[in-house]
Image (cartoon, helix red, strand yellow):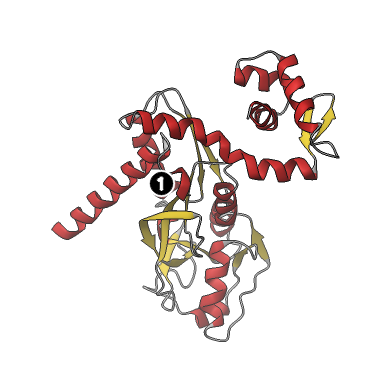
């Protein structure tokens, strides 16, 4: 376990010096443990460079197996002290919907001020992989496909909408059909984007293709492209802030609700930080449902 701990810390830190600092040991101790571990294998686990190290193919395979051991110490601590609250620790979050989830993140920070939050704003597909690879603790995104190793909490839902300039000829309509939209200049996303897949699904059900001369990476670029008159864009409704330069119009055929989830690895739920984030998300969701029921 000492060898594995040194190996994982070295990959996480990027070099032997920072790994030694992470584990509060000397650099020669880290180097000795890595050499001992590599002696068990026929090929090296790490590639050495002047400024750091990188895992070989074999090293990546070993890391995939052993990184879950990093959770063992924290899990044992929770078992011995079930009321333990997160102290000085780091919680890594992958976020695909900042407008929806930032209030939740902010409330967590207020409740647990000693916890450092590291937030990665990435696409939905990247969020899922980061959670599965244990590179983040929590994912905030629409988890559409079921994975046995993942758990999720439904937090919010919204639908696909069209985004137009206020002076666009269609901007005054209460809703738009896909046939109306198909005749316009469209701003689209890369094929792997969640919004693009939803858009193609809605158009495809009516035997229409989605095509556009402008392809963007994300919502910010889409919004800017729309405001500069490059065409009609698309987004999920709650992902667009009120903006006098943009008009959000429902798409008639887009009846499917996309559910935004809080996502975590099942076997990591009891870990400090993860456990408390899930509990807070549950409280906020239940509070929102109570407010709706009172209306």
> Where residue 114 sits in the image (x, y, percent)?
40, 23
Residue 18, placed above or below residue 48: above
Residue 65 appears anywhere in the view: yes
Residue at screen point 62% across, 80% down: 209
The quadrant of the picture occupied by the N terminus is top right
Image position, residue 170 (x, y; %): 46, 73
Q: Is residue 295 at all visible to an observer of this figure?
A: no
The residue pinned by badge 1 equals 101
Residue 30, above or below 132: above
Q: What is the quadrant of residue 38 in the picture?
A: top right
Q: Is residue 271 above or below residue 289?
A: above
Q: Nearer the viewer, residue 255 or 80?
A: 80
Which quarter of the image is occupied by the C terminus? bottom left
Residue 131 relative to residue 108: left or right: right
Foreground residue, 165 or 49? 49
Element at badge 1? helix
Label 1 Cα crowd, 10 Å radius (few <14 / some 14-19 / many 20+)? some
Which residue is at the front of the view, 242 or 265?
Answer: 265
Question: Percent from the top left, x then y, of residue 75?
Answer: 45, 35
């Amino acid at each position: 376990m000492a060898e594995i701990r040194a190996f994982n810390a070295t990959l996480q830190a990027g070099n032997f010096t920072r790994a030694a600092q992470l584990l509060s040991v000397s650099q020669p101790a880290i180097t000795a443990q890595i050499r001992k571990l590599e002696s068990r294998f026929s090929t090296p686990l790490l590639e050495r460079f002047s400024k750091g190290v990188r895992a070989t193919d074999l090293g990546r395979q070993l890391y995939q197996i052993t990184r879950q051991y990093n959770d063992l110490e924290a899990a044992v601590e929770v078992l011995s002290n079930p009321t333990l609250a997160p102290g000085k620790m780091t919680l890594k979050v992958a976020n695909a919907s900042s407008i929806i989830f930032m209030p939740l993140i902010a409330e967590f920070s207020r409740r647990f001020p000693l916890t450092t939050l590291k937030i990665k704003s990435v696409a939905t597909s990247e969020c899922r992989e980061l959670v599965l690879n244990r590179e983040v603790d929590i994912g905030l995104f629409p988890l559409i496909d079921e994975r046995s190793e993942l758990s999720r909490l439904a937090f919010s839902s919204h639908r696909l909408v069209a985004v137009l300039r206020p002076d666009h000829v269609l901007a005054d309509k209460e809703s738009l059909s896909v046939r109306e939209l198909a005749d316009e200049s469209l701003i689209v996303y890369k094929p792997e984007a969640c919004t693009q897949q939803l858009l193609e699904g809605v158009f495809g059900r009516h035997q229409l293709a989605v095509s556009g001369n402008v392809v963007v990476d994300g919502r910010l670029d889409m919004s800017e492209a729309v405001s500069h008159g490059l065409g009609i864009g698309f987004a999920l409704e709650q992902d667009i802030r009120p903006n006098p330069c943009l008009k959000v119009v429902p798409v008639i055929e887009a009846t499917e609700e996309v559910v935004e989830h809080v996502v975590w690895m099942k076997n990591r739920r009891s870990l400090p930080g993860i456990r408390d984030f899930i509990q807070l998300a549950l409280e906020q969701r239940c509070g929102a449902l109570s407010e709706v029921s009172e209306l």
